[in-house]
Image: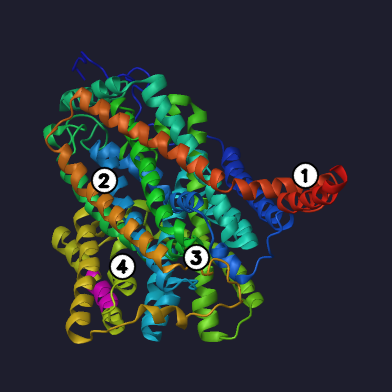
Amino acid sequence: MSTVLENPPPKFDEYRYQQDFFGGEPPLSEGIGYLVVLGFGALFSIFTTLVVLADKVFAGNASITSEHFNTAGRMVKTGLTASVIVSQWTWAATLLQSSNVAWQYGVSGPFWYASGATIQVLLFGVLAISLKKVAPSAHTMCEIVNARWGKTAHITFLFFAFCANIIVTSMLLLGGAATVEALTGVDYRLASFLIPWGVILYTSAGGLKATFIASYLHTVIIFAVLITMITMVYIKVYSSNQIYAFLEQTVSYSQEECEAIFSDEEGVTFFEKGKYACGPVNGNNGGSYLTMLSGDGLMFGIINIVGNFGTVFVDQSYWQSAIAARPSSAAKGYLLGGICWFAIPFSLATSLGLTSTALMLPISASEAGSGLVPPAVATDLMGNAGAALILVMLFMAIVSTGSAESIAVSSLIAYDVYRQYFNPDATGKQILLVSRVVIVGFGLFMGCFAIVLNEIGLNLGWVYLFMGVVIGSAVIPLWNMMTWSKASGKGAVIAAWSGLVLAVIGWLSGAQAQSGKISVATLGTNEVMLSGNLIAILSSGLIHYVYSKFIDPQDFDFAELDKNITLVEHDMSGLGAEQQDPVELRRAERWITRRGYILTILLIVVWPLLSIPAGVFTESYFAFWVLVAIAWGFGAAITITLLPLMESSEEILEVLSGMWNYITCRSGNAKELTKEEGEVEEEDGSVVA
């Protein structure tokens, strides 16, 4: 190659002649892979089980009943609710796919990933407080469906709920196992089986409460790694001005210069447009990575918004978190959780994702599609320690969401299948046994299912785009069930099934029209997936509205809903008069409704519109953009780490004092000890006096 590079990329000499970053070789050893997958799984299982046991023994909390196992006592506070939402919503895709879209589209990728998946959590806060108002005794969303609309609707939405759980868990294992294999060499089939075991152990032992405790720890570790990466990129190693200059340099190269950069020792190029980050970006304003005016970025954002409504509104794990939260915390917990979660894809991808293109690391499109952008940049910045940190972060994301999905499926089968159709008089012990058996069975089933999907040729990105086609049609009927008295049960059933059928037809037809054939590849394009996602959610919403408004209008009294839901055991925790104060519930509903809608409009309308006049970002505009990402990341990390500890300080003190009293051969916890000492002082008072 005769082209002379006057201004080579910053890492040109270090990675010269490399066709891909990892060269087909995992950066970490198999031993580290097994240590993380098995070691962390065992560690969290032991730790969370001991914490639940300590809470029971030393704080004097009751034994685990079936109600407590599946609802965590319905008294979870705001901070822990928020951390659990962050944990549940942080998938492998959150960490990997967000940096991939930054590598593809530039600054618009992280923004659309974050905003397009935050608004669902914010809006679900409205349903969370509605649930506390009209169905506080519920264990699952399908119980509410059955109580309002009857058996046919119950079976229909049970199908969609299981689809949501299976799709989400599939994405966790597909993305997780593939990345564990890429980083450590551990066979993905083995990883698919081993990853669920850490989840199975502590979830089956401690139920929802153990899941919440583990989720808090996972979230803290994820944010610790996030802060480390932001600091390395924009504070310790580079600055926003340097990254800006490098990004400008990346898009300045001509085709000939890109071919010269990506060539072997003999000067033969292996560069192909789209295979590496080099030269102008197609579809972006000015061909720049530094603009929100990106056609492909916007299309990804729309798919992201539509698809993620299904994985929040139809996923039992989010309803379960709402059920577990105390009424005063439900709305605030979802709002705070959504705001803090925004920082993970936005801040992480704004640092690692943009740095990958700025430094022009030899990351190929296939590596980026496999989720290797974060570990590649982390390895460049910190060596193998960086790759190990990303692996730990990824494992935290997998097991935290996996445990939530496991307990969600166990609740659906225990309450909506076993109790509803096989044993209506089931005791608490029977429900508890079924829940634990299902957790184990679901973990094993999903290991097999993930392997089958991989053998078919479906990867994380494909399933991520596809999820809205399958479950999107259930979203609006479920929203209407909780908020609209005229919503028809028959209309909901017709809308859900019709929306699914129409979405699949539109999806298949789109692939045939665009590519002339139907295959895994043609079905996975952005345009085809967008059509299927939109048809699913919009057609079902229209059908349900028309049927409920003009054909079968209802006049449902929401005050009657909770009367149709029965508790298995007489565990009234979280269901007392104080928690069910109608004035407080109305105030909480107004609070979340206003803020949820306002923040949604700000994130998907106002913010993008305000960034349009900027066109291609200036250096100072980009510096401000990075400052927002850094501040949001640090603020979210501090909030999500400290707030749960501050809110639960009294309970933590009870456990610690109980342990101390046990060690010093005294009895009781802090409260009991204080009471005893008070009584002694009273008796001695007259003597001293």
Decide if residue 667 is on the left or right side of residue 572. Answer: right
Residue 258 image position (x, y, % from top left): 21, 26
Question: Which residue in the structure is indicated by mark 1?
Answer: 660
Decide if residue 115 is on the left or right side of residue 284. Answer: right
| Pointer 2 or 3: first along the chain | 2
Element under disc 4: helix
Q: Are marks 3 and 4 in contact (CB under 8 Å)?
A: no
| Pointer 3 or 4: first along the chain | 4
| Pointer 1 or 4: first along the chain | 4
| Position above or below: 314 against 376 | below
Q: Disc 2 vs disc 1: which is toward the camera?
A: 1
Q: Residues within 10 Å of mark 2 (few under 14, many from 20)?
A: many
Q: Disc 3 vs disc 1: which is toward the camera?
A: 3
Alpha-carbon distance for marks 3 and 1?
Answer: 33 Å
Q: Is residue 521 magenta?
A: no
Element under disc 1: helix
Question: Which residue in the structure is indicated by mark 2?
Answer: 112
Amino acid on which disc 2 is placed: Trp
Q: Are marks 2 and 3 in contact (CB under 8 Å)?
A: no
Q: Are marks 4 and 2 in contact (CB under 8 Å)?
A: no
Alpha-carbon distance for marks 2 and 1?
Answer: 50 Å
Alpha-carbon distance for marks 2 and 3?
Answer: 37 Å
Q: Residues within 10 Å of mark 1 (few under 14, many from 20)?
A: some
Q: Residue at x 58, y 67 (%)?
A: 573
Magenta-drawn segment: 495-503
Question: Which residue in the structure is indicated by mark 3?
Answer: 579
Element under disc 3: loop
Amino acid on which disc 3 is placed: Gln
Residue 307 image position (x, y, % from top left): 29, 59
